[in-house]
Image (cartoon, rainbow, N blue to C red):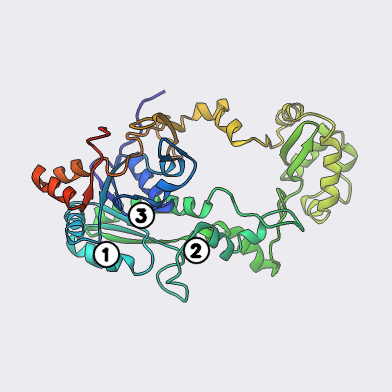
Amino acid sequence: MKDSTMQVLAGTRVLDLSKVLAGPLCGQYLGELGADVIKVEPIDSGDDTRGWIPQKEGESAIFLAVNHNKRSLAIDLKTADGLGIIHDLVKKADVVIQGFGPGTAQRLGVDYKTLSALNPRLVYCEISGYGRDGPLGNEPGYDVMLQAFSGMISTMGERNGELARASFSPVDIGTAMHGLSGVLAALLQRQRTGQGVYVELSLLDTALGFMSYMAQSYWFTGEEPAPMGTGHPSMSPYQAFQASDGPIMIGAGNDRQWRRFCAIAGLEGFAGHPDFETNAKRVSNLDRTAALVQERIQRKTVAEWLELLRAGGIPCAPVHSLGQALSHAQVASRGLVVKTEHPALGSLNGIGLPIRFQNMDRQAHRPPPLLGQHSAEILSEAGYDASAIAALQARRVIQDASSSHPF
């Protein structure tokens, strides 16, 4: 086990003006690659997610999940002094991330035009719901609304049952991942040209990006994709089945796998049956195929099927709870879970960057910050003396928590 990860962005300064999930997670990923990420938050309340449940010792699990590897600057951006501080920081920054609602960045004085004039080398990453133009350019963006708008929700849930949303905010998380790629590409472009880059992301683009192969199928057939539970519109059997003691996911995704599965499951007579011999025929007879497989799967336990199917090269997996997945030895072997020492909570787990370099475990270099934990420290680095910082704090331009919770 190695105790560090690649710090390719060491020396890169990021101002993270975003909130909730997409922008903050993008900033967290940049921090994991070594960037100095300053999370800019409103005084008193901070990021919206600081108030979300579940909570422990006044700290929100959702906030903690997407904000390690950052320092917190709590500031009133609506004051002239607060805006002046941000403008001072921008002059020496490399990246700004923001996801304000329509027109808000311009009203606050932190829009691309204003900030790029202060720092022409700035990489400016803007996140919106539907993009900044078009008929919905002024609509706010929320993960579940884009799941609905993009057609994603219309494809999820059980056949002839209730619709379901994807539970883990994939549109926000996917946008964060695209943000990481976009910022890294922009930094490379700046290295070549010496000029900053405007990077634009929308939750709409991310959501439809997830729908890409379904979109292609729709263009081919004109048929709307429909909810299929755990099933798949192009492969069969490829879904969850009920073993004698619980569910198991099985995917015989091609005809070779189907023949091997039949041999293992005692269905040899169906391997070459004219209704089941090819994947296309099995999809055409989806319900019959599923019933045929289910009748056999229910005869053994999940563990028994896993042993048999893995030995036969048939894709399969237990349907874990999240707790079971997190505690699995395979997850431990990946070095994905990072640990930090939080000033209020002590030892804290987190999910690291889902990219591994040089076989090194992932590592968080800072715990998620308390609100305003580093305000004085950041201003001191920017050239503000102690009396100026104290005056700003007295006038509630900034909020500093370092005196009560030293890092």
What amino acid is found at the position of numbered circle 1 in the picture?
A: Leu
Residue at x 75% of width, y 34% of height: 246
State which quadrant residue 301 falls in.
top right
**Which secondary structure lies at badge 3?**
loop
Could you tell which of marks 1 and 3 lies nearer the N-terminus?
Answer: 3
Q: CA distance from mark 3 to mark 2?
A: 18 Å
Residue at x 18% of width, y 62% of height: 80
Could you tell which of marks 3 and 2 lies nearer the N-terminus?
Answer: 3
220 vs 372: above or below: below
**Which secondary structure lies at badge 1?**
helix
State which quadrant residue 105 falls in.
bottom left
Q: Of all residues shown, which one is farthest toward the bottom?
A: 135
Q: Which quadrant holds the C terminus?
A: top left
Residue 225 in the image, given as x and y percentages of width and height: 69, 62
Q: Residues within 10 Å of mark 2 (few under 14, many from 20)?
A: many
Residue highlighted by disc 1: 108
Q: Nearer the viewer, mark 1 or mark 2?
A: 1
Say whether residue 283 is visible: yes
Q: CA distance from mark 1 to mark 2?
A: 25 Å
Residue highlighted by disc 3: 18
Residue highlighted by disc 2: 204
85 vs 329: above or below: below
Compared across the picture, whether 226 is left or right of 295 comes to: left
Q: Nearer the viewer, mark 3 or mark 2?
A: 3
What amino acid is found at the position of numbered circle 2 in the picture?
A: Leu
